[in-house]
Image (tube, rainbow, N blue to C red):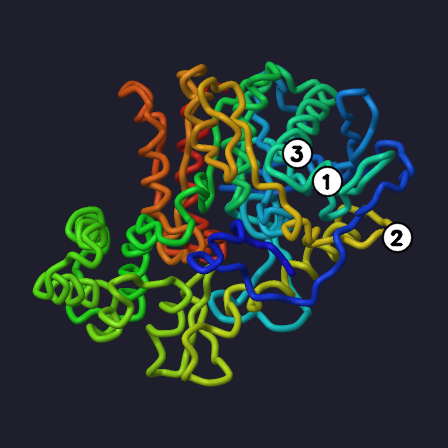
Amino acid sequence: MLFMGCIVPSHAQEQRPNPQQKPTQTTPGAGNANHAIPAERSVVTKHELTLNGKTLRYTATAGSLLIRNKKGEPYGSMFYVAYTLDGANSDTRPVTFLYNGGPGSASLWLHMGSVGPVRVITDSPQATGGAPYKIVPNQYSLLNKTDLVFIDAPLTGYSRLVGKGTAKDFDGVDQDLKAFTRFIVRYITLNQRWNSPKFLMGESYGTTRSAGLVAMLQSHGVSMNGVILLSSILNYNDLAPGQDVDYIGYLPSYAAIADYYNKLKNKPADLTTFLQQVRDFAAGPYAEALWEGDRISPAKFDAIAQKVADYTGLSVQYVKNSNLRINPTRFRKELLRGQGEILGRYDARFEGTDVDNAGATPGYDPSDSGITGVFVAAVNNYLEKDLKYTTTETYRADSGGIRNWDWSHHPSGQRGFWNQRWPDVAVDLAAAMRKDPKLKVFSANGLYDLATPFFKTEYDISQMMLAPSLVHNVQFHYYPSGHMIYLNVQALKELTHDLDAFYAGFSQ
């Protein structure tokens, strides 16, 4: 199973189900056996990239760093690829740490598709198919603004257990946060980057990690300048069965997707204005109707069902049969049922055919299967041929650790919050922002993302109880894309334009 995006605790699988299952593997490193402790290794190559008519000369470093437990014993080796601009002043040159989510995903998706110096060409939103694939210089890279360090999570990529380390040392919210904290501290120490402006950029569960990580790093004396959240999930507690906030959170995404497929009776002249109308309805009359539950009057039930149908492109009868509550997995099957098509979960712009049209839910996720092969092949080819990183190890796109993930969490640096059974890292992010009023947050959202809907992200961030002076430290941006915003090249162009402005807001 490859974990590109957000995976949720088992209690929420009905609301936000796991990605399409693939052949599984045993979690690497399970058990208590001692592992060899290798030396820290790096391979350095020199490259050039032309952006906006200017040639950037940079160094790529592919390597691994050891992380140590409280006793000072190495228990993990974490693989990374760093891109640093040659001749830059490290005291003013920003450095950004990037990673994907899962949990248990390597960083190949961001590394090969987003803001690095190269990117792989895909046929998105159609399935890309088989090799050969083309890796090209990335004209939308952020290398002109910041050095970039792509980190493979523990037990993914070429990250491995060492010494007495076990999978249990990494497979959990707080265990993962400790590992990344130790890696970043080691990296900035080894590379003399303590005085550099520092940023975090995570995607999907990587946003969960970022929100917790910024607070944990802060408690270790490492202050971040900014946090970039791509396709966020910050609070897992309201995903449990029976929580209507999940249905409310999805409704504007359904409307955006229905507009994309021309399934609305009256196509809106302006999508932004239309989606605000849907937000208002979702948070107002729709939420009120769900709150009433069985006490709702027949007339009101009919009126709300009609409105939901108008906004989602579904039939009124289907909405009524669903008791006004539209499950995202069923929506992916139902919207184009008449055309014999299913939609992607990560990116609803992807379409596919199913074994039949009678089922309630899709048999797979076209937005997963449509890109997996190209990204896995690209990262393997690129690391070996371009970055000259050779090894007998297998690059692991995922660790399989989700199966035994410890979802409990203790927020860093925030009194009054007990151990959480399911993580709400918005608490951590808010605490970090209170302690550092200059900390800025950039929230990027795909309109066609059915893994982490944008309205739900808005809700989670609005519940952080920030002082009015801090509320505007969070920027929201929206793109005509799915979970992996960069799969739409136009959206990638818009994203990097917005991030250029975000980085320019910091003194360099």
The secondary structure type at the circle numbered 2 is loop
Q: Are marks 3 and 1 in contact (CB under 8 Å)?
A: yes
Q: CA distance from mark 3 to mark 2?
A: 28 Å
The answer to whether 144 is drawn above or below residue 157 in the figure is above
Classify the position of the N terminus by image quarter.
Answer: bottom right
Which of the marked residues, 1 or 2, is nearer the chain's N terminus? Answer: 1
Q: Quadrant of residue 488?
A: bottom left
The residue under label 1 is: 168
Q: Quadrant of residue 97?
A: top right
- Taking the spot 70% from the left edge, 29% from the top edge, the residue there is 183
- Residue 240: % across, % down: 42, 50
Q: Is residue 232 visible?
A: yes
Report the residue that reaches farthest toward the left.
Answer: 299
The residue under label 2 is: 392
Which of the marked residues, 3 or 2, is nearer the chain's N terminus? Answer: 3
Which of the marked residues, 3 or 1, is nearer the chain's N terminus? Answer: 1
Q: Nearer the viewer, residue 220 or 323?
A: 323
Q: Is residue 274 visible?
A: no
- Residue 195: % across, % down: 60, 15
The residue under label 3 is: 175
Q: Are marks 1 and 2 in contact (CB under 8 Å)?
A: no
Give amino acid for label 1.
Lys
Which-is-in-front pick, marks 3 and 2? 3
The secondary structure type at the circle numbered 3 is helix
Give amino acid for label 2.
Thr
- Taking the spot 88% from the left edge, 52% from the top edge, the residue there is 392
Q: CA distance from mark 3 to mark 1?
A: 8 Å
